[in-house]
Amino acid sequence: MARRQVDEVRDGVELTSLDAEAFDGAGVTKRALLDHLDAVAELLLPALADRPLSVVRARPGQAPFMQKNLPRGAPDWIPTVDVWAESSQRTVHYPLCHDRRTLLWFGNQRAVEFHPTLVPHGATTTGELVIDLDPPDGAGFERVVAAAHPVRAALAELGLAAAVKTSGATGLHLVVPLSEQLPIDDAFAATRAVCARAAALAPDIATTAFIRDDRGGRVFLDPTRAGGATLAAPYSPRARPSLPVSFPLTWDELDGASPADFTVGTVAGLLDGRPTWSELRPAPAALQEVLLTEGRAIPVPRVAAMHEGKRRKRARERGA
DNA sequence: GATGTGG
DNA sequence: CCACATCAACGCCAT
DNA sequence: ATGGCG
Ligand SMILES: [Mn+2]
Ligand SMILES: [Mn+2]
């Protein structure tokens, strides 16, 4: 007799508390989360393959939290990769999620968001760029869509094409396949350059300003998503009311889309006959050298942000 | 959710 | 045995 | 060791 109540066993994984709300304010049950993960497993797993996985877990009575280490007590059939974390001076044991039962196990842990790294473990090059569009708080979805168009235009001007998905939260993710592998440093530079070009095309609706106060209500083209950074995977739910899901769209669908239509309650029923994220990926294209030259000349934005933060803090302390 | 504590 | 507390992240890099 | 940000 196990002490805890097991509601169901799927793929050998014991699932618990399935009829409870997924987390405070979720508005859907933990069962809905598990059923969604099960329904999209075949589409989600390829995006997680060989990538150190971070998850956001959300439990009733607590704020959601990011988890990188595979916790002690996890089943030994979940593989991990060790990554040295410079900032904390320790080894992080990242899980790899390669099969349905691992996905279900995480779901039972109330892992709601799945954030793989942008490059597989051990890779030193990448075959794609990612453009992450983050609208300001409270902005309607049309605003991010409006910002996506100049990004697409900037890419087109360079002979590049992108697939697009909702982030599941408020923004959009664009993925640009490349015909040649690019060293990760170069991917950072190229991403900075694409974001800068797009912001220049539409300076009133998009910006690359890292400091929120400097964005002036514009959509943030986040030039830091490359290399070991993480991104919410396609078909991953998000820890928000109704558990909206990161959902791939065609460019034709984008303008009329509303991200609230894609949730753990609806996505399973929308998949039939739709192109998948892999199928929406355009043909790889060659990256022009000029993009690297441009990008290398753009400073890493976070550095400037750090100084600005220190300056403000000093000013505050002096004035007080 | 899992683990460790101490009553 | 149960009740309860505690935990579950990173990097960017100049100063 | 910090700072802002995702
Ligand atoms: Mn984003
Ligand atoms: Mn972002």
Image (cartoon, coloured by chain):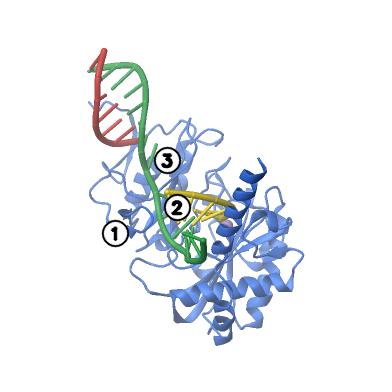
Chain colours: A blue, B red, C green, D yellow
Q: Is residue A276 left or right of residue A46?
A: right
Quarter in which the C terminus of chain A is drawn: top right
Q: Nearer the viewer, residue C11 or A162?
A: C11
Q: Secondary structure at mark 2?
A: strand
Q: Nearer the viewer, residue D5 or A59?
A: D5
Q: Residues within 10 Å of mark 1 (few under 14, many from 20)?
A: some
Q: Helix, strand, or loop for circle 1?
A: strand
> Looking at numbered disc 3 in the image, what kind of residue is underneath it?
Arg
| Position of C14 relative to C7 (above/below) | below
Going from N to C along the chain, the mark reached first, 2 or 1, is 1
Determine the residue located farthest toward the front in the rendered image. Answer: A318
Q: Secondary structure at mark 3?
A: loop
In the rendered structure, find residue A110 and report the number of the disc placed on it: 3
Q: Residue at position x 31%, y 44% from top?
A: A71
Q: Is label 1 or label 3 in front?
A: 1
Asked if the residue under mark 2 is in contact with the one under mark 3, i.e. CB atoms within 8 Å, the reply is: no
Quarter holding residue A117:
bottom left
x, y percentage for residue A239? 52, 44
Q: Which residue is mark 2?
A: A114
Looking at the image, the residue that sits furthest to the right is A204
